Amino acid sequence: MKKFIPFILALFLCLSCKNENNSEEVAKADDNSEMTTEKPEFAIIIHGGAGTILKKNMTSEKEAAYKAKLEEAIRVGYNVLKNGGSSLDAVTKTINIMEDSPLFNAGKGAVFTNAETNELDASIMDGKTLNAGASAGTTNVKYPIDLARAIMDKSQHVMMAGSGAEKFAQEQGLEIVDPTYFYTERRFNSLQNAKKREQVELDHDDKVSFYDEDIKDYKFGTVGCAALDKNGNLAAGTSTGGMTNKRWGRVGDAPIIGSGTYANNATCAVSSTGWGEFFIRAQVAHDISALMDYKGLSLKDAAKKVINKVGDLGGDGGIVAVDKDGNMVAEFNTAGMYRATMNDKGELVIGIYEQ
Ligand code: ASP
Protein backbone atom coordinates (compact mmCIF):
# COMPACT_ATOMS: atom_id res chain seq x y z
CA MET A 1 0.00 0.00 0.00
CA LYS A 2 2.87 2.35 1.09
CA LYS A 3 4.37 2.30 -2.38
CA PHE A 4 1.11 3.73 -3.77
CA ILE A 5 1.08 6.74 -1.40
CA PRO A 6 3.34 9.01 -3.53
CA PHE A 7 1.27 8.13 -6.59
CA ILE A 8 -2.04 8.95 -4.79
CA LEU A 9 -0.56 12.24 -3.56
CA ALA A 10 0.61 13.16 -7.05
CA LEU A 11 -2.81 12.38 -8.45
CA PHE A 12 -4.50 14.51 -5.74
CA LEU A 13 -2.15 17.46 -6.43
CA CYS A 14 -2.74 17.19 -10.12
CA LEU A 15 -6.54 17.19 -9.68
CA SER A 16 -6.50 20.21 -7.36
CA CYS A 17 -4.26 22.07 -9.84
CA LYS A 18 -6.81 21.38 -12.55
CA ASN A 19 -9.58 22.77 -10.38
CA GLU A 20 -7.62 25.93 -9.70
CA ASN A 21 -6.97 26.36 -13.37
CA ASN A 22 -10.63 25.93 -14.14
CA SER A 23 -11.73 28.51 -11.64
CA GLU A 24 -9.12 30.88 -12.99
CA GLU A 25 -10.46 30.36 -16.48
CA VAL A 26 -13.97 31.20 -15.29
CA ALA A 27 -12.69 34.30 -13.58
CA LYS A 28 -10.90 35.37 -16.74
CA ALA A 29 -13.95 34.67 -18.85
CA ASP A 30 -15.98 36.85 -16.54
CA ASP A 31 -13.43 39.61 -16.74
CA ASN A 32 -13.29 39.31 -20.50
CA SER A 33 -17.03 39.33 -20.85
CA GLU A 34 -17.16 42.49 -18.81
CA MET A 35 -14.55 44.05 -21.02
CA THR A 36 -15.87 42.94 -24.36
CA THR A 37 -19.65 43.01 -23.97
CA GLU A 38 -21.21 46.39 -23.46
CA LYS A 39 -24.40 45.04 -21.99
CA PRO A 40 -25.61 47.67 -19.55
CA GLU A 41 -26.99 46.67 -16.17
CA PHE A 42 -30.18 48.56 -16.87
CA ALA A 43 -31.66 51.03 -19.35
CA ILE A 44 -34.70 53.26 -19.76
CA ILE A 45 -36.30 55.06 -22.70
CA ILE A 46 -39.40 57.28 -22.82
CA HIS A 47 -41.55 59.15 -25.31
CA GLY A 48 -43.97 62.04 -25.00
CA GLY A 49 -45.68 61.61 -28.36
CA ALA A 50 -44.74 61.94 -32.04
CA GLY A 51 -45.96 64.34 -34.70
CA THR A 52 -45.24 67.38 -36.84
CA ILE A 53 -42.88 68.78 -34.27
CA LEU A 54 -40.78 71.30 -36.17
CA LYS A 55 -38.06 73.53 -34.78
CA LYS A 56 -39.47 76.49 -36.69
CA ASN A 57 -42.78 76.19 -34.80
CA MET A 58 -41.16 75.83 -31.41
CA THR A 59 -40.31 78.63 -28.99
CA SER A 60 -37.24 78.19 -26.87
CA GLU A 61 -39.41 78.33 -23.71
CA LYS A 62 -41.65 75.54 -24.97
CA GLU A 63 -38.67 73.45 -25.98
CA ALA A 64 -37.07 73.97 -22.58
CA ALA A 65 -40.31 73.04 -20.80
CA TYR A 66 -40.60 69.75 -22.72
CA LYS A 67 -36.95 68.91 -22.15
CA ALA A 68 -37.20 69.65 -18.44
CA LYS A 69 -40.28 67.46 -18.01
CA LEU A 70 -38.78 64.60 -20.04
CA GLU A 71 -35.67 64.78 -17.89
CA GLU A 72 -37.64 64.91 -14.65
CA ALA A 73 -39.68 61.88 -15.70
CA ILE A 74 -36.82 59.70 -16.90
CA ARG A 75 -34.71 60.46 -13.85
CA VAL A 76 -37.46 59.05 -11.66
CA GLY A 77 -37.36 55.74 -13.54
CA TYR A 78 -33.57 55.80 -13.71
CA ASN A 79 -33.34 56.07 -9.92
CA VAL A 80 -35.77 53.19 -9.44
CA LEU A 81 -33.58 51.02 -11.70
CA LYS A 82 -30.31 52.21 -10.21
CA ASN A 83 -31.51 51.28 -6.74
CA GLY A 84 -32.36 47.77 -7.92
CA GLY A 85 -36.10 48.41 -8.40
CA SER A 86 -38.16 46.62 -11.03
CA SER A 87 -38.68 47.76 -14.61
CA LEU A 88 -42.44 47.70 -13.87
CA ASP A 89 -42.01 50.24 -11.07
CA ALA A 90 -39.70 52.36 -13.22
CA VAL A 91 -42.24 52.41 -16.04
CA THR A 92 -45.20 53.20 -13.77
CA LYS A 93 -43.47 55.98 -11.82
CA THR A 94 -41.96 57.59 -14.91
CA ILE A 95 -45.34 57.69 -16.64
CA ASN A 96 -46.97 59.16 -13.50
CA ILE A 97 -44.76 62.26 -13.87
CA MET A 98 -45.87 62.77 -17.47
CA GLU A 99 -49.53 62.08 -16.58
CA ASP A 100 -49.26 64.95 -14.10
CA SER A 101 -47.99 67.37 -16.75
CA PRO A 102 -50.42 69.27 -19.02
CA LEU A 103 -47.71 69.25 -21.70
CA PHE A 104 -48.65 65.70 -22.62
CA ASN A 105 -51.81 64.03 -23.87
CA ALA A 106 -52.06 61.73 -20.86
CA GLY A 107 -53.65 62.27 -17.46
CA LYS A 108 -53.88 66.05 -16.94
CA GLY A 109 -53.65 67.48 -20.46
CA ALA A 110 -55.58 64.67 -22.16
CA VAL A 111 -57.35 65.62 -25.39
CA PHE A 112 -61.13 66.04 -25.63
CA THR A 113 -63.67 63.77 -27.24
CA ASN A 114 -66.34 65.10 -29.60
CA ALA A 115 -68.70 65.11 -26.58
CA GLU A 116 -66.26 67.40 -24.72
CA THR A 117 -65.21 64.75 -22.25
CA ASN A 118 -61.80 63.22 -21.59
CA GLU A 119 -61.57 59.45 -21.98
CA LEU A 120 -58.25 57.98 -21.04
CA ASP A 121 -56.52 54.75 -22.07
CA ALA A 122 -53.45 53.01 -20.65
CA SER A 123 -51.61 49.69 -20.60
CA ILE A 124 -48.61 47.99 -19.06
CA MET A 125 -46.83 44.68 -19.66
CA ASP A 126 -44.38 42.58 -17.67
CA GLY A 127 -41.77 40.95 -19.91
CA LYS A 128 -40.91 38.29 -17.33
CA THR A 129 -44.38 36.77 -16.93
CA LEU A 130 -46.09 38.14 -20.05
CA ASN A 131 -48.75 39.40 -17.69
CA ALA A 132 -50.46 42.60 -18.76
CA GLY A 133 -53.06 45.14 -17.71
CA ALA A 134 -55.03 47.73 -19.67
CA SER A 135 -57.83 50.23 -19.15
CA ALA A 136 -59.87 52.09 -21.74
CA GLY A 137 -62.18 55.08 -21.72
CA THR A 138 -61.93 56.08 -18.07
CA THR A 139 -62.98 59.61 -17.06
CA ASN A 140 -62.09 59.96 -13.38
CA VAL A 141 -58.97 57.93 -12.64
CA LYS A 142 -56.13 60.39 -12.05
CA TYR A 143 -53.33 58.05 -13.09
CA PRO A 144 -54.54 55.60 -15.75
CA ILE A 145 -51.20 53.77 -15.77
CA ASP A 146 -51.78 52.89 -12.08
CA LEU A 147 -55.15 51.45 -13.05
CA ALA A 148 -53.54 49.35 -15.81
CA ARG A 149 -51.01 48.13 -13.26
CA ALA A 150 -53.73 47.28 -10.72
CA ILE A 151 -55.66 45.38 -13.39
CA MET A 152 -52.50 43.37 -14.10
CA ASP A 153 -51.54 42.80 -10.46
CA LYS A 154 -54.86 42.60 -8.66
CA SER A 155 -57.41 41.10 -11.04
CA GLN A 156 -57.73 38.02 -13.18
CA HIS A 157 -58.44 40.17 -16.24
CA VAL A 158 -56.18 41.93 -18.73
CA MET A 159 -58.44 44.74 -19.89
CA MET A 160 -61.28 46.76 -18.36
CA ALA A 161 -63.23 49.63 -19.87
CA GLY A 162 -65.45 52.56 -18.89
CA SER A 163 -67.52 52.53 -15.71
CA GLY A 164 -66.47 48.99 -14.78
CA ALA A 165 -62.80 49.97 -14.88
CA GLU A 166 -63.60 53.07 -12.81
CA LYS A 167 -65.41 50.96 -10.21
CA PHE A 168 -62.43 48.63 -9.98
CA ALA A 169 -60.09 51.64 -9.59
CA GLN A 170 -62.21 52.92 -6.72
CA GLU A 171 -62.25 49.51 -5.04
CA GLN A 172 -58.47 49.35 -5.32
CA GLY A 173 -58.14 52.71 -3.60
CA LEU A 174 -56.65 54.47 -6.62
CA GLU A 175 -56.89 58.25 -6.80
CA ILE A 176 -60.27 59.32 -8.20
CA VAL A 177 -60.82 62.89 -9.43
CA ASP A 178 -63.72 64.89 -10.75
CA PRO A 179 -63.71 64.56 -14.56
CA THR A 180 -63.17 68.35 -14.81
CA TYR A 181 -59.68 67.75 -13.38
CA PHE A 182 -58.59 66.81 -16.91
CA TYR A 183 -59.75 70.10 -18.45
CA THR A 184 -57.06 72.28 -20.01
CA GLU A 185 -57.80 75.30 -22.14
CA ARG A 186 -55.26 74.34 -24.76
CA ARG A 187 -56.86 70.95 -25.41
CA PHE A 188 -60.36 72.38 -25.28
CA ASN A 189 -59.42 74.94 -27.94
CA SER A 190 -57.96 72.17 -30.06
CA LEU A 191 -61.31 70.42 -29.97
CA GLN A 192 -63.16 73.59 -30.97
CA ASN A 193 -60.77 74.06 -33.91
CA ALA A 194 -61.25 70.46 -34.95
CA LYS A 195 -65.02 70.85 -34.86
CA LYS A 196 -64.91 74.07 -36.88
CA ARG A 197 -62.81 72.43 -39.53
CA GLU A 198 -65.17 69.51 -39.65
CA GLN A 199 -68.12 71.89 -40.11
CA VAL A 200 -66.37 73.68 -42.96
CA GLU A 201 -65.88 70.36 -44.69
CA LEU A 202 -69.53 69.42 -44.19
CA ASP A 203 -70.69 72.83 -45.45
CA HIS A 204 -68.65 72.30 -48.56
CA ASP A 205 -70.18 68.91 -49.03
CA ASP A 206 -66.77 67.34 -48.79
CA LYS A 207 -66.32 63.92 -47.41
CA VAL A 208 -65.38 64.51 -43.81
CA SER A 209 -61.82 63.42 -43.38
CA PHE A 210 -61.88 63.08 -39.63
CA TYR A 211 -58.14 62.73 -39.46
CA ASP A 212 -57.04 65.51 -41.78
CA GLU A 213 -53.50 66.79 -41.62
CA ASP A 214 -54.14 69.30 -38.83
CA ILE A 215 -56.42 67.16 -36.77
CA LYS A 216 -53.90 64.38 -36.94
CA ASP A 217 -51.51 66.54 -35.00
CA TYR A 218 -53.97 67.26 -32.22
CA LYS A 219 -53.49 63.76 -30.92
CA PHE A 220 -49.81 63.95 -30.26
CA GLY A 221 -48.52 63.83 -26.74
CA THR A 222 -49.22 60.28 -25.65
CA VAL A 223 -46.60 59.10 -23.18
CA GLY A 224 -44.76 55.81 -22.86
CA CYS A 225 -41.79 54.10 -21.31
CA ALA A 226 -39.77 50.92 -21.80
CA ALA A 227 -37.19 49.69 -19.30
CA LEU A 228 -34.73 46.90 -18.52
CA ASP A 229 -33.87 46.33 -14.86
CA LYS A 230 -30.85 44.83 -13.12
CA ASN A 231 -32.56 41.42 -12.99
CA GLY A 232 -32.89 41.37 -16.77
CA ASN A 233 -36.63 41.99 -16.65
CA LEU A 234 -38.22 44.13 -19.34
CA ALA A 235 -41.43 46.17 -19.02
CA ALA A 236 -43.31 48.72 -21.10
CA GLY A 237 -46.26 51.02 -20.52
CA THR A 238 -48.29 53.63 -22.40
CA SER A 239 -50.85 56.25 -21.32
CA THR A 240 -52.98 58.59 -23.46
CA GLY A 241 -56.10 60.67 -23.90
CA GLY A 242 -56.37 59.26 -27.43
CA MET A 243 -57.27 61.52 -30.36
CA THR A 244 -59.00 64.89 -30.33
CA ASN A 245 -62.65 64.76 -31.43
CA LYS A 246 -62.86 60.98 -31.07
CA ARG A 247 -66.40 59.62 -30.96
CA TRP A 248 -68.53 56.68 -29.94
CA GLY A 249 -66.21 55.30 -27.30
CA ARG A 250 -63.34 55.11 -29.76
CA VAL A 251 -60.35 53.26 -28.33
CA GLY A 252 -56.89 53.58 -29.87
CA ASP A 253 -53.80 51.41 -29.74
CA ALA A 254 -52.46 52.60 -26.38
CA PRO A 255 -54.43 50.11 -24.25
CA ILE A 256 -54.16 47.28 -26.79
CA ILE A 257 -51.49 44.80 -25.74
CA GLY A 258 -49.44 44.00 -28.83
CA SER A 259 -50.22 47.34 -30.49
CA GLY A 260 -49.49 50.16 -28.04
CA THR A 261 -47.50 48.14 -25.53
CA TYR A 262 -45.62 44.86 -25.49
CA ALA A 263 -42.82 43.36 -23.38
CA ASN A 264 -41.14 39.98 -23.47
CA ASN A 265 -37.88 39.15 -21.68
CA ALA A 266 -36.86 37.02 -24.67
CA THR A 267 -36.86 40.01 -27.02
CA CYS A 268 -37.77 43.58 -26.11
CA ALA A 269 -40.18 46.05 -24.52
CA VAL A 270 -42.03 48.55 -26.74
CA SER A 271 -44.32 51.56 -26.27
CA SER A 272 -46.02 53.13 -29.30
CA THR A 273 -47.43 56.54 -30.14
CA GLY A 274 -49.20 57.70 -33.25
CA TRP A 275 -52.31 57.26 -35.27
CA GLY A 276 -53.83 54.46 -33.23
CA GLU A 277 -56.01 52.86 -35.88
CA PHE A 278 -52.92 52.04 -37.95
CA PHE A 279 -50.95 50.86 -34.95
CA ILE A 280 -53.73 48.43 -34.12
CA ARG A 281 -53.91 47.14 -37.66
CA ALA A 282 -50.13 46.74 -37.89
CA GLN A 283 -49.90 45.17 -34.40
CA VAL A 284 -46.83 47.34 -34.00
CA ALA A 285 -45.42 46.48 -30.57
CA HIS A 286 -45.81 42.72 -30.86
CA ASP A 287 -44.67 42.67 -34.47
CA ILE A 288 -41.33 44.18 -33.46
CA SER A 289 -40.87 41.48 -30.83
CA ALA A 290 -41.97 38.76 -33.27
CA LEU A 291 -39.48 39.88 -35.94
CA MET A 292 -36.69 39.62 -33.37
CA ASP A 293 -37.95 36.28 -32.09
CA TYR A 294 -38.84 34.47 -35.30
CA LYS A 295 -36.52 36.17 -37.79
CA GLY A 296 -33.59 37.09 -35.58
CA LEU A 297 -33.73 40.75 -36.55
CA SER A 298 -32.03 43.35 -34.37
CA LEU A 299 -34.29 45.70 -32.44
CA LYS A 300 -33.34 48.55 -34.75
CA ASP A 301 -34.11 46.62 -37.94
CA ALA A 302 -37.35 45.22 -36.55
CA ALA A 303 -38.54 48.66 -35.44
CA LYS A 304 -37.68 50.23 -38.82
CA LYS A 305 -39.51 47.50 -40.69
CA VAL A 306 -42.66 47.84 -38.61
CA ILE A 307 -42.76 51.65 -38.71
CA ASN A 308 -42.33 51.39 -42.50
CA LYS A 309 -45.30 49.05 -42.54
CA VAL A 310 -47.36 51.66 -40.64
CA GLY A 311 -46.28 54.25 -43.21
CA ASP A 312 -47.21 51.98 -46.12
CA LEU A 313 -50.70 51.62 -44.67
CA GLY A 314 -50.97 55.43 -44.50
CA GLY A 315 -50.37 55.89 -40.78
CA ASP A 316 -47.78 57.78 -38.81
CA GLY A 317 -46.15 57.77 -35.41
CA GLY A 318 -43.31 56.03 -33.66
CA ILE A 319 -42.08 53.72 -30.95
CA VAL A 320 -39.52 53.62 -28.19
CA ALA A 321 -38.07 50.25 -27.22
CA VAL A 322 -35.32 48.52 -25.29
CA ASP A 323 -34.13 45.00 -25.95
CA LYS A 324 -32.98 42.31 -23.54
CA ASP A 325 -29.36 43.45 -23.99
CA GLY A 326 -30.15 47.04 -23.13
CA ASN A 327 -30.07 48.42 -26.68
CA MET A 328 -32.47 51.35 -26.97
CA VAL A 329 -34.25 52.52 -30.10
CA ALA A 330 -36.56 55.42 -30.96
CA GLU A 331 -38.05 55.00 -34.43
CA PHE A 332 -40.66 57.27 -36.04
CA ASN A 333 -41.92 58.42 -39.42
CA THR A 334 -43.13 61.83 -38.22
CA ALA A 335 -41.12 65.06 -38.18
CA GLY A 336 -40.40 64.62 -34.51
CA MET A 337 -40.97 62.65 -31.35
CA TYR A 338 -40.39 63.82 -27.79
CA ARG A 339 -38.03 61.24 -26.35
CA ALA A 340 -35.25 60.56 -23.87
CA THR A 341 -32.91 57.73 -22.90
CA MET A 342 -30.73 57.01 -19.88
CA ASN A 343 -28.22 54.19 -19.56
CA ASP A 344 -26.72 52.66 -16.44
CA LYS A 345 -23.92 55.23 -16.47
CA GLY A 346 -26.50 57.95 -16.00
CA GLU A 347 -25.95 59.37 -19.48
CA LEU A 348 -29.04 61.26 -20.55
CA VAL A 349 -29.97 61.91 -24.19
CA ILE A 350 -33.04 63.97 -25.05
CA GLY A 351 -34.42 64.27 -28.58
CA ILE A 352 -37.31 66.16 -30.13
CA TYR A 353 -36.72 66.51 -33.85
CA GLU A 354 -35.42 64.10 -36.45
CA GLN A 355 -31.63 63.79 -36.10
N1 ASP B 1 -51.91 56.36 -30.26
C1 ASP B 1 -52.83 57.24 -29.59
C2 ASP B 1 -54.22 56.90 -30.04
O1 ASP B 1 -54.43 56.65 -31.21
C3 ASP B 1 -52.56 58.66 -29.84
C4 ASP B 1 -51.12 59.08 -29.80
O2 ASP B 1 -50.23 58.28 -29.62
O3 ASP B 1 -50.82 60.26 -29.92
O4 ASP B 1 -55.12 56.95 -29.25
Image (cartoon, grey):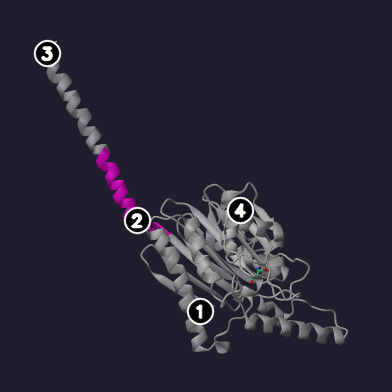
Amino acid beneath label 4: Ile
Between 117 and 54, the one nearer to me in the picture: 117
> Badge 4: few (under 14), some or many (20 or more) residues near its Cα, within 10 Å?
many
* Distance between mark 4 and mark 3 Cα atoms: 75 Å
- Which callout, 4 or 3, points to the residue nearer the camera? 4
Residue located farthest toward the top when viewing the structure as drawn: 1
Residue identified by numbered label 2: 36
Q: Earlier in the sequence, mark 4 or mark 3?
A: 3
What's the residue at 68%, 72% (across, down)? 118
Q: Position of residue 130 (x, y in %)?
A: 57, 49
Amino acid beneath label 3: Lys
What's the residue at 57%, 84% (across, down)? 54
Tell me the tag on residue 151.
4
Between 226 and 121, the one nearer to me in the picture: 121
Residue identified by numbered label 3: 3
Image check: 209 left or right of 146?
right
Magenta segment, which residues?
A: 23-42
> Badge 2: few (under 14), some or many (20 or more) residues near its Cα, within 10 Å?
few
Residue identified by numbered label 1: 66
| Residues at marks 4 and 3 touching, judged by CB atoms closer than 8 Å | no
Q: Earlier in the sequence, mark 1 or mark 2?
A: 2
Q: Secondary structure at mark 2?
A: helix
Q: Position of residue 317 (x, y in %)?
A: 63, 71
Ligand 1 location (quadrant): bottom right
Q: Earlier in the sequence, mark 2 or mark 4?
A: 2
* Distance between mark 1 and mark 2 Cα atoms: 37 Å
28 in the magenta segment? yes
